[in-house]
Amino acid sequence: MEREGFECTYLEVQENGLVDLDAFRAALRPDTILASVLFVNNEIGVIQPMEEIGKMLREHKILFHVDAVQALGKVPVDVEAIQADLMSLSGHKIYGPKGIGALYVRRKPRVRIEAQIHGGGHERGMRSGTLPTHQIVGMGAAAELAVQSMESDSRRIRQLRDRLLNGIMSRVEEVYINGDMEHRVPHNLNLSFAFVEGESLIMALKGIAVSSGSACTSASLEPSYVLRALGKSDELAHSSIRFGIGRYTTEEEIDETIELVASKVGKLRELSPLWEMHLEGIDLNSVQWAAH
Amino acid sequence: MAYSEKVIDHYENPRNVGSFAKEEAGVGTGMVGAPACGDVMRLQIKVNEQGIIEDAKFKTYGCGSAIASSSLVTEWVKGKSLDEAMQIKNSQIAEELELPPVKIHCSVLAEDAIKAAIEDYRKKSGAVSAAETH
């Protein structure tokens, strides 16, 4: 939109990863036409106050676009409750097929959008092209299963998440949680292991699929922009690991992960000059680093 | 990140990890990088009376290739004179470890660490010999 000449305001989040509703209200302008919010954050799993935002936007007659890709199947997603006008969804985040997504477009009050793909006029002219029936059926079936098992999945996953968190916290010192713990899906745990660099820890956690940021930025060496937005230091952002817990994760896998994390963080700290300095009581912020 | 077997070997079995007491005679310490950039290397050399690096140790905070690069150079500097060690180039490190292009900076850092350690040793020993001749 910016390329087309629209002005965009990017809102900062609070230290816990949640948007400040007063700041959100203050950022609305008389000529604001659209607001877009990430329902559940992909790196730290925090859930934004969507109902409050939706209500505010409806009062101001501003279109509300919701990116619910990470929310679907994890929290109730109700376009009426949050008064969403547009909502993006994706199949692969709900155990469905890759390569299919959906855009919800509200009819009342009507939202008019322009087609991005032109041709034979399929999907009421909105998305021309032959429909991938298998993908559509696959995403639909996955969505049905997700709704059916959401409650039991969430309960079980929360227990596993607590087991993982408590296990790591009791075995490893200097670990920091990124993002609010209350307004958060249990499927995500994002931790910073101080004095250990994230990529080297990922290499050490063989057999466990974790990431140091989102897959979208895995080709970049920059620390996570999400963690930077929380006001985390570059160093802690470089030291973060995102654990994802899913429908098929078992208790044994959680216990193995705790063991592995504890031993590998210990090993990497033995290798880390920063850890040694920390143990000697040196404040790393007082050191004059030769930046490069 | 697809790493070569050599990087993985150095990462999993790092050589010469540890520290010498900084004040010890003959020890030169080089610390380069910054936590905010995601890598800090500390390389230490122990130089004998003939001016030969007889031992080296390192500790590194950083990615797998940063750890491998510093581990490799501790092996390379051992047995070399200071002038010979000064000749080690980052391109040789990158080539030996087959570093991917986005990780070339790790080899640059390792070269800088050698230079910083030698410089520190020279400064210290220069100060000592100056004091002795005084």
Image (spheres, coloured by chain):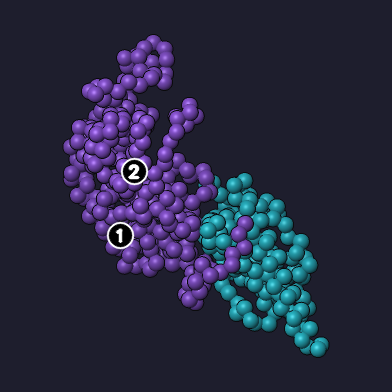
Circle on res. A165: 1
Query: From this viewpoint, is residue A182 visible?
Result: yes
Furthest-top residue in this view: A120
- Quadrant for residue A6, please give it: top left
**Which percent across, then down, holds residue B111?**
68, 60
Quick one: A275 or A65, which is closer to the camera?
A: A65
| Alpha carbon separation for disc pair 2 and 1 | 37 Å
Q: Is residue B119 above or below residue A100?
A: below
Rendered-image quadrant of the N terminus of chain A: top left
Furthest-right residue in this view: B133
Residue occupying the point 79% across, 67% down: B83
Circle on res. A274: none
Q: Is there one chain holding both mark 2 and mark 1?
A: yes
Q: Which chain does the residue under circle 1 lie in? A: A
Q: Is residue A152 above or below residue A65?
A: below
SS at circle 2: helix
Q: Is residue B51 left or right of residue B55?
A: right
**Which percent across, then down, holds residue A157?**
24, 50
Residue occupying the point 52% across, 49% down: A222
> Is tag 2's residue or tag 1's residue first in the polypeptide sequence?
2
Residue occupying the point 62% across, 78% down: B22
- Quadrant for residue B28, please give it: bottom right
**Which chain shows up in cyan?**
B
Q: Name the amino acid, label 1.
A: Leu
**Which chain shows up in purple?**
A
Q: Is residue A37 left or right of residue A156?
A: right
Q: Is residue A269 left or right of residue A129?
A: right
SS at circle 1: helix
Q: Residues within 10 Å of mark 1 (few under 14, many from 20)?
A: some
Residue labelled with disc 2: A26
